[in-house]
Amino acid sequence: MTRFRIAIDGPSGSGKSTVARKVAQRLGYLYIDTGAMYRAVGLKVTREQLPWDQPDAVIEAASRARIELRAGPHGLRVILDGADVSEAIRTEAVGQAASRVSSIPGVRRILVRAQQDLGRRGGVVMEGRDIGTKVFPEAELKIFLDASEPTRARRRFAQNRDKTGALDLEGILEEIRQRDRRDRERADSPLVQARDSLYLDTSNQTVDEVVEKILKMVQVVEGKSGSG
């Protein structure tokens, strides 16, 4: 049976990670969180206190970063330079750092190559912001998840509620707007919907409802592949 590449793109807080992980589980595919890779680089740059106005230093750090994505009993584990940073990369501060490193073309080139290597054989659900446009423009199924800014802010607030030092709802909303602006306006691989991707607004849908819709899309692709 053909094992497809499923590309799921969209802005922060649209539900990409949760949806992609569940779709991968249902299909028996490998789940690849590309955002975690950018967060890992952002964490490395932050820890090494590298200057943001010197992109060559950030690119060099990305080239040195040893990033592994491991499936574990409690979800995806992110290993950076031999250490588990799965929790450390999920702070708002690291999210902002990830957005900044992702705007540097040299960093994107390094990570895009790594992502292409991970998904080359198919049987993957890969989510990010440029999967359908840059990493795998030839993916068999492309989906663009979206949601309103207030909805995305509420989701992020709920995720961060128990974290010490988490921002309030208004602060998170402003950070989402700033991140959207950087992601959409960056010169290299901006966040845009691929022309042949399917748009899903998740604002008023549960995760399970979105997952079921995507699985039906997979069935359609499988049917077309089998008939071809």
Image (cartoon, rainbow, N blue to C red):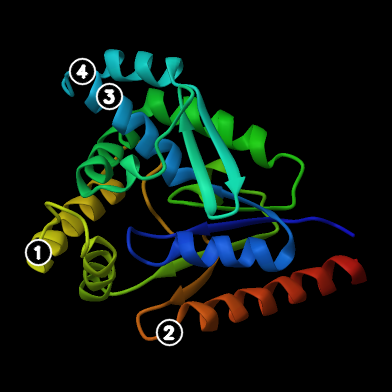
Whole-percent x and y of residue 3?
Answer: 80, 55
Q: Counting residues from the N terminus, which is met first, the one under dot 4 or under dot 3? A: 3
Q: Mark 2: which amino acid?
A: Gln
- Label 4 and label 3: CA atoms lie apart by 6 Å
- Label 2 and label 4: CA atoms lie apart by 41 Å
Whole-percent x and y of residue 110?
Answer: 48, 25
**Circle 2 crowding by C-alpha within 10 Å: few under 14, some 14–19, many from 20:** few
Whole-percent x and y of residue 74?
Answer: 53, 55
- Label 2 and label 3: CA atoms lie apart by 36 Å
Q: Which residue is mark 3?
A: 45
Q: Quadrant of the C terminus?
A: bottom right
| Residue nearer the viewer, 46 or 134 | 46
Q: Are marks 4 and 3 in contact (CB under 8 Å)?
A: yes
In percent of the image, x 16 and y 21: which residue is there? 53
Q: Counting residues from the N terminus, which is met first, the one under dot 2 or under dot 4? A: 4
Q: Tell me the tag on residue 50.
A: 4
Q: Quadrant of the N terminus?
A: bottom right
Q: Which residue is mark 1?
A: 168
Whole-percent x and y of residue 113?
Answer: 57, 29
- Relative to 120, residue 143 above or below: below
